[in-house]
Amino acid sequence: MFVYLSKKIAIPNGVKLKSLSWNGINGWIVCGGEDGLLKVLKLDSAQQAEKSKNSGAPSNLSMNQTLEGHNGSVVCVCWNENYRKLTTSDQNGMIIVWMLHKGMWYEEMINNRNKSNVRGMRWTPDGQRICIIYEDGAVIVGSVDGNRLWGKEIKTELAHVEWSPDGRNILFCTRACEVHIYDSIGNFVSKLPLYCLEDAAAATSLVGIEWYDGSEGLFSLDQPVLAIGFENGRLQLMRNEADTSPVLVDAGMSLSCMRWNSDGSVLAVAGTLSTKSSSGERRDVCMVQFYAPSGQHMRTLKVPGSTMSALSWEGGSLRVALAVDSFIYFANIRPNYRCGFLGDTLVYSFTTPERHDSALLFWNTKTDERVTKLLSKPLVAVHAAADCCVYATQADDADNQHVLRLCSANGSPIDQKYIDFEPAFLTLTQYHVVAASADAVYVWQYRTLTNKLTSVDAGTGSLRRKEGRERCWHIDDELRASSEPVAMVAGREASQDPIIALAASSACMLVARESGALLRFSLPHIGLEHKYTLRGRTQSIGINCDSTRISLIDANGLLTLFDLEMAKGAGGEVRLPPAEPDQPPARFERKDVWQVLWAEDNAQLFAVMEKSRMVLFRELVPDEPVVTSGYLCSFSDLEVRAVLLDEVMREPEHPSKKMLQSHQARALREAQEHLRESNLADAFGFVEANPHPRLWRLVAEAALHKLDFGVADKSFVRAEDYMGIHLVKRLRLLDDAKKQAAEVAAYFSQFDEAEKIYRELDRRDLALQLRANLGDWTKVVQLVQQGGGDDTKLRNAWDRIGDQFLEQSELDKAAGYYAQAQNMPALADCLYRSEAYAGLVKLAADLPDGTPLLVDIGHKLSSVGMSADAVDAFVKGGDVHAAIDSCLMQHKFEGAVELAEKHNFPGVQKALAQFAGQLIDSGKKLQAVELYSKASQFTEAAKLLTRIAADVGASRSNPQRAKKLFVAAALEVERMRKQMLDSKAPQGGTQTAAQTLESLVTQDKATGGDKWLDSAWRGAEAYHFLLLAQRQLYSGKALDAMRTALRLREYETVLPKEEIYSLIALTAFYAKFYGQCSRAFVKLQAAGCAEAKHAEISKLALSIFTRFSPVDPSQKRADCPSCGGNVQEWDAHCAGCGQHLPACTLTGKAILEPHLTAKCRVCKHSFYETEAHGLQNCPLCHSQLPLQLHAGY
């Protein structure tokens, strides 16, 4: 930052000032002094002051009111900015509250305690409460409407008071240099430790306490906001009242007051520094020192006078007011904004109260496009040059590392590098990024994304450094070719001669050190070329375009120039020619300079910002100054571009082009004046005496307007403008002056004028060609419709207009123009991108058969899942293979089979088999079943289901799932049988006996090769009766369980014999049918079990049948429904006639009375209706039963 005194206001009668405060919202300044002096002043804003200076107004004071009411010295003044109130107090303890009425200040309230002096007054940040402290320890807290909230007597002498930002705590400073914390209702909380006084030898006093409320945001979450200052120059900067590691600063002078600026980024500390002259005379110098929240010293401002009693910041922090003796001094602040300019893009950082993170905004000043880039870590530095921008932040994954990120003009990332130190200096050239701390230098030769020089090793993720592309070294180390390219600098001792400034160009890098040494390194091959010696402490360096001269600004704002390439490379300060022959040349100097910018195209041109004016220099000769407060962005073609960053930062997210400024060099203005007021020859002579490419182009353009091709040709040659020379050559070949004038008008972008000339010549074809070359296709359409072309040109123009709307993502408009141009491929692509799929389907319907575009439309529709429409498009386009592939991709397997059969495409079955094989190999067997089922391959689906069911059943872990899988397999077989029968039936009729026989033979061939398909329901029946027997046994129905278990004897091929007869033996034992139990044990012993298990079975049988005889209790026998013979309820066949007796799927009983049963229409299995009370689904296949069965009988 840079600070300079800009204005001084004298207090009448030499009354000395005691207090001062600047209202940050409305701009009023109140100052209090001896003898009851109280004044309210108001200055114009910084921008209004600049305008008044331009207009020559004598003063910019818009208010100067004296307030009467105090008799003693006014020692305390305090603004309530939210409620527009002013509170003042004098040395006698009188307090007056002032209010604004019709532009004047009047007394609203007076209070006089008459016991002690007021030592401090502070309003809460919201303006609702005020705390007033007295020297004797009395504290009063009141509301904004004048009511007293509470009072307290603290048994100590008080000196200062401050509210916490949230208004919950009050900090009281005592005369004994202590800080006590109380809550908002007056209860003591704690005592604040003062670490900065631990090693203080002499007694001191506390001069102020300031707590920034964060109303304008924070640059980082751990930023110090609480400042405590002492008379001995010690400062303690804390993050909060509980901070145990505050920032400690020694200002080195006697302090009197201090203040944070409006956004908490700068702390201004005022006081006096005692010095002794060479004669021993003691002298006190008033000065203000400015510190960053981190404790870094930023600037020192010396002020005339002997005593500085108060200071206050303007809202926006661009000016500070200083009360010195009987004067008010105003100092302007030029902040060091973190910004850069590349091409037409301004990049700058900002913070907002809503967010605690920083943001970078990339503003294209030409197109007004803005891109905001939020940063997760605090921004350290930013710099822009050429076509790139680099910014440094803390690394996300490391405490001590920082990352340099390179990005383009729109904020897109290009590359990044990690460094082991915090860069205090950062610069960017066309080829290099240079970062430096006080002790280390890092150079990175970057490239764009298309030609990166660093890469990431595959699989490891570690950065691979290319030799010579990165260099890092400690500033005290000697740089050799054999040195390590990237030396470890972290943890090294601090240099005794630290780096204080850095600059780089495409040819060299300059490093300034505290001792006055200036090191010049070559680029791109880094090596120390020369060492110069400078006078003073350099703060910033600028290099001209050919790296022969540099500008140096020291800590006091003094600008000097230094030649790098004088005789024998020694270098030296630039000196002005002597005013008199006998006088020595004086050193070139400019005072109060805060920015210098060299021209990009002329090594002798540079622009200087001095206070609030800009001066252009050409060969050390200054132009007349221009009043501006803008920051210089670029200097080329004799024109300086600047931006009012102060205005931009007021609303950083909404910059305006009104904040941009452009200033022309005197040579450019004079050349323009010669061209306006004199002839072309005089202007040519002037530019010949002051040559510059921009001036030659200016003369050439003027000559073209006058059709003086001789002068134009010479001027373009001097300007080295090949395209201009080519234009003159082409103009000379034209045979008509009007055509030449039209071409000249087109060259100067006066296209309407050129078109008008062509129309007057009745050459619409040339006008049409002009508009076509410009890409102004709307004008082309108008010209063609007026008779200037044919339908081909019209369709081409519509097609180009469609392309323009497509680039702007206005897809609906683009589609309309493509339709007019009959560009069907582009129309289809536009409809697809705009998701207008209905329009895409309609387009496919309108296209003739066999059009290649139909296949493309089919692929587009297939990609969004519109399988049916995609198939229609493929078929219409003649690509049946693509239609089938689309069905397979969308799992429309049945449709794929139908298409294959309809169009005699044999490959679909093979494709289905391959797809199913892939699913089975990847363990997705059920998906393969779904594939077969949807493709009407019921036999394959059933075979795969039965294999899955058999595997599940063999695991013996989930018999319920095994049953469901067998049921699903059986249902697939039923679907296969139904399909075979339906396919043989004539449409609208019934099958003949021969057709039925043929269907049965085909069905037998399809199922005969698989035992499961031949009797599809056996597996489902086996697991159904197994589960039914288990449920019956666990519900206490042992006899029913035994009947059902005996049914399992039919399914020895499905279930393990050991499991079947174990269940029979168990159920028979509980049903006391010991005969059945004995026969089951016999079967178990004959089942071929392991010897150990056989022994256990024999032992168990012995223990049972030694207690119970193997005899069944008598049971009532039933009649066989076929032969009338006696049968049991668990018999599966009649012993007399061999008739199979099906089992009831509900109870497991044999069905001996068929007339009392109902049959499921799906699985064709029967059950007794008397047992089906409330039954809704078939117990075996779980299909829905007829409604009349739901109620039961």
Image (tube, grey):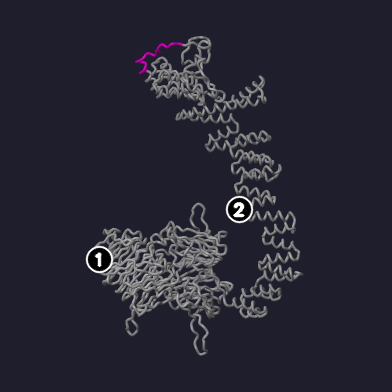
Q: Is residue 589 magenta?
A: no
- Return the mark for residue 137: 1
Q: Name the side, left or right, on which 853 lies relative to 599.
A: right
Q: Nearer the viewer, residue 629 or 969?
A: 629
Give the amino acid type for the residue marked by disc 2 in the picture.
Glu
Residue at image mark 2: 810
Q: Is residue 252 visible?
A: no
| Residue span colored magenta | 1102-1117
Residue farthest to the bottom, as pictured: 582
Q: CA distance from mark 2 to mark 1?
A: 73 Å
Q: Position of residue 17 (x, y in %)?
A: 34, 75
The residue located at (57%, 31%) in the rendering is 941
Instruction: Look at the image and say whether residue 1111 sits in the magenta stretch.
Output: yes
Is 420 situated left or right of 283 in this image? right
Instruction: Look at the picture and state if 446 lies above or below 707.
Output: above
Q: Main secondary structure of the magenta part?
A: loop
Numbered disc in front, either 2 or 1: 1
**Image mark count:** 2
586, 143: nearer the viewer: 143
Identify the residue shown where x is 37% and y is 71%: 30
The one nearer the camera, 320 or 944, is 320
The 10 Å Cα crowd at callout 1, few under 14, some 14 to 19, many 20 or more, is some
Q: Residue furthest left?
A: 155
Give me the disc on residue 87.
none
Residue at x 71% of width, y 43% of height: 848
Type of the residue with mark 1: Gly
Q: Secondary structure at mark 1?
A: loop
Q: Residue 1088 at what x, y percent from top left?
A: 45, 22
